[in-house]
Image (tube, rainbow, N blue to C red):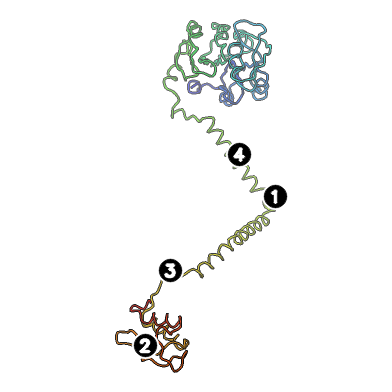
Amino acid sequence: MLWRALRQVERGFYVDVGACDPDLGSVTKAFYERGWRGVNVEPQPGYHRRLVAARPRDRNLRVALGEHAGDVTMHVIADTGLSTLDAVEAAKRAGEGFRVVDEVVIQETLATICARDVPPEQPVHFLKVDVEGSERAVLLGADWGSCRPWIVVVEATRPMTQEPTYEEWEAILVRAGYGFVYGDGLNRFYVASERDDLRESFAYPPNIFDEFVRVSEMNALTRARRSEADRAAILTSRTWRYTRPLRATARRARRLSASLRRLPDEASRRIRARSAPSSRIVPIRRDERQRHLEADIPREPTMPRLDHRSDGRSKPASPGPSPRAKGSTPTVIADLSPRAQRIHHDLSSPDGTG
């Protein structure tokens, strides 16, 4: 929203109270990258060191801001944006499990910062205030007559909640000649009365015409580009060229190993296919079955000679001497061996199935 309103300004100026990290969640990073500069106020030592390293064009001040100058106790919650001068908020964070360390820091006023660290005749295009519960004290310490930012952005909810707090300090800005133009659920935006032309920039929330990209999307794109660049560097490196024969050999070895692993399965499949019964059963006609059975008769000495009836069934011939008991007349079927009886039964069956 700030960029939409101020994109026509080249090399503008900002004051960021509670600047925190120079990159993560920074309101001023996009402007700094486009040639802007300003004053960053951050009393937490870790974040102040990062600002000094990342923002050489900026004035980076390790002080707190309030209604009056002096030494104050800051409740530091390391590596978060939750450090505060408000003892009540610090107690809440401690109750939530955060480690809170008290540290004495120098406190100045916004009026002093603007008079000392903003170059003469330099307009302040926007002021951002995010101090975890001490917004009212910061705004009370300003000289709105001598330093008038075009746009003022103030965090408007209690830390880590959606509970609004702007009623505690909004009257200060209204008395100073600032009008509310936009709220995003966390911050409220105010425009100076003399810069009323900027109001129309806040008529609509961020939309497709702003062509914005979320930070998470930009980070993902950056990682993808970095990975592609690393891959390209590897593929064009001397080491990659020298190891090409080794990679080809390794690929062939992997293919051979895979083939050998599949070999037992393939052999087993073929053996099963050969030993498995045929899925197609071809019926044997009666005349063929009878022919096969009769071929076994000469091998069975107890089998009598059979006559064939006209209907295809067989009957035993006239009784004759049995090979087992010469000179006697056996009962033809009873005297047959089990194998001969089975053959006789099969031949006598009407359908040839026994």
Secondary structure under tag 3 reads loop
Disc 3 versus disc 2: nearer the observer? 2
What distance separates the C-alpha of mark 1 from that of mark 2?
95 Å
x, y (%) of residue 237? 67, 48
Name above or below for residue 249 compared with residue 221. Answer: below
Inspect this view and state whether residue 59 appears: no
Amino acid type, mark 2: Pro
Mark sitting earlier along the chain (3/2)? 3
Do tag 3 and tag 2 residues touch (Cβ < 8 Å)? no
x, y (%) of residue 286? 36, 80
Mark sitting earlier along the chain (3/1)? 1
Relative to 10, 208 lies left or right: left
What distance separates the C-alpha of mark 4 from that of mark 2?
99 Å
Sort mark 2 into few (<14), some (14-19) or many (20+) by Cα contacts within 10 Å: some
x, y (%) of residue 129? 56, 15
Amino acid type, mark 1: Thr
Do tag 3 and tag 1 residues touch (Cβ < 8 Å)? no
Foreground residue among 265 and 193: 265
Disc 3 versus disc 4: nearer the observer? 3
Q: Which residue is mark 4?
A: 226
Sort mark 3 into few (<14), some (14-19) or many (20+) by Cα contacts within 10 Å: few
Q: Which residue is mark 1?
A: 239
Do tag 1 and tag 4 residues touch (Cβ < 8 Å)? no
What distance separates the C-alpha of mark 3 from that of mark 1?
59 Å
* Image quadrant in which you'd find residue 268: bottom right
Specify the label residue 279 is tagged with. 3
Secondary structure under tag 4 reads helix
Q: Which residue is mark 2?
A: 316
Name above or below for residue 283 compared with residue 16. Answer: below
Mark sitting earlier along the chain (1/2)? 1
Foreground residue among 239 and 304: 304
